[in-house]
Every structure is written in C-alpha cells, then in structure tokens.
Amino acid sequence: MVGTPIGNQYDFSPRARDILDTVSVIACEDTRTSGSFLRNMSIRTPLTSYHQHNEHGKTPELINRIQAGESVALISDAGMPAISDPGFLLARAAHQAGIPVVPIPGPVAAVTALAASGLPSDRFVFEGFLPQKKGRQTRIKLLVEEERTIILYESPHRIVKLMKELLEHTDENRLCAVGRELTKMYEEIRRGSLRELYDEFSTRSKQKGEFVFLLAGKSYSEEDVN
C-alpha cells in the first residue's frame, strides 16, 4: 500500500518510487490519472484498475495473483490507499490469506491540514466525506457534540453548504479551519470562527479545488491555552 503525493510530486518518496518500479503490477483508482503521474516519474510498471465500483470483484483476483507469485502495489489517485479511498477490502483480504501487508507511507490530506490548522491535534476524529443525503443531518448533529477536533473532506460544490449546516447546529463562534489545494500552487489555509469562514467562502464567486474542513472540539477555547 503505497502513498502518493496529494499535489506536489516532490513529496513522492524514493522508497515509494523504488517499490512501484519493481512490483509486478500496480492497482490504481484511475489508470489514466495514475498513468500520467507514473510516466512523469519514469515508472513503466503495468497498471490495473481498482476502484470503488470494482473492488469487491477485483480483490479476489489480486489475492490470487499474489498467491501465484506476483507482487502487487496499491495506490490511490492521491494520498494513502484506504483513507477515503479503496484499500480496506484488499488489506483485509490479504491479512485473511496470510499475505503480508506492507505500508509505504506518504502524504495524507487530513493530517496535513490538521498540522497546519492551529487547532488541537492531540485528539482528533477523521470522518472523511459525510453522506450527501440520507443520514447527513444525523451525522452532523452528532459531530457538533464532539470534544475532539473533527476532520472532514468536502467537495467544492458543498463546502459552503457544510458550513451553513454546521451553523444551524452549533455556536457560530466555534473555531474552524479550511485547507484547500494542499501542497499545490494555489494552496490556501484559512482559520477563524465558523461564521467568519462561512461569510468569506459564501461570497466567493466559485469554489475550486479539494477541501479539508476542520472543526474544533465543542469545549475548545483559545482563552484556555497558554
């Protein structure tokens, strides 16, 4: 399981490069996206698709290939496999079959944003993407009661909606942060109250990029920190 850059290709580790260059096959979400990146890295290893729509059927196939003597590396379009991306099923199946699972660490947007947010990082909850419809409001009502820092992924089309929904269920002065396009040319990290960030982002003509949203725990106050 190999981590790939979340935006900046210089975050690609030498170990990750060596592994992807020497395995029998690389399983990836999108062969076009990964193919372009790997060609830029001068890696010519054969690719096979492994994404949310085929992972249930593809997992046994990959396990069989490993048991037949091949080596398989799993990557996602960006970041670490299995973190809001396919990977859990394959890792579980490998363990169940007695196959070693070797992690090759790489960047993860969630902890990258957390480290830069200035919000408490000693205890946190990663929720990934919230449900788009069914169960979304129930999940939000539970999360606003959380005492740990909450990390969410959100699309540019719903980031303002997310902040509006949170405003309906928690204090508008609650601290939060937004990380956008992390490690990329137009990287942006904004921090402030929920109301301040909602007012700022809701006035933008168009949201662009990948977003990480962080909400401070319910009882956190800057005044309590020395």
Image (cartoon, rainbow, N blue to C red):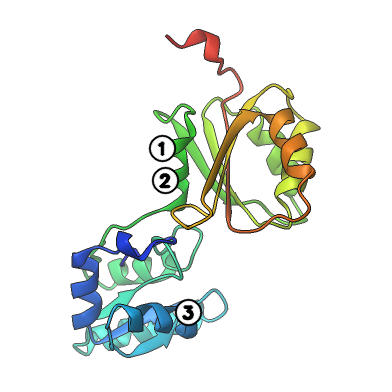
As shown in the figure, which amino acid type bears the numbered disc 2?
Thr
Q: Which residue is mark 1?
A: 115
Classify mark 2: helix, strand or loop: helix
State the separation of the CA atoms marked 3 and 1: 27 Å
Q: Are marks 3 and 2 in contact (CB under 8 Å)?
A: no
Question: On screen, 19 above or below 13?
Answer: below
Q: Which label's residue is closer to the chain start, 3 or 2?
A: 3
Classify mark 1: helix, strand or loop: helix
Query: Residue placed at 23% from the left, 72% from the top?
Result: 17
Query: Residue placed at 64% from the left, 27% from the top?
Result: 145
Left or right: 30 with respect to 2?
Answer: right
State the separation of the CA atoms marked 1 and 2: 5 Å
Q: Which residue is mark 3?
A: 33
As shown in the figure, which amino acid type bears the numbered disc 1?
Ala
**What x and y, as percent, mark residue 163?**
73, 40
**What x and y, as percent, mark residue 165?**
78, 40
Question: On screen, 167 above or below 189?
Answer: above
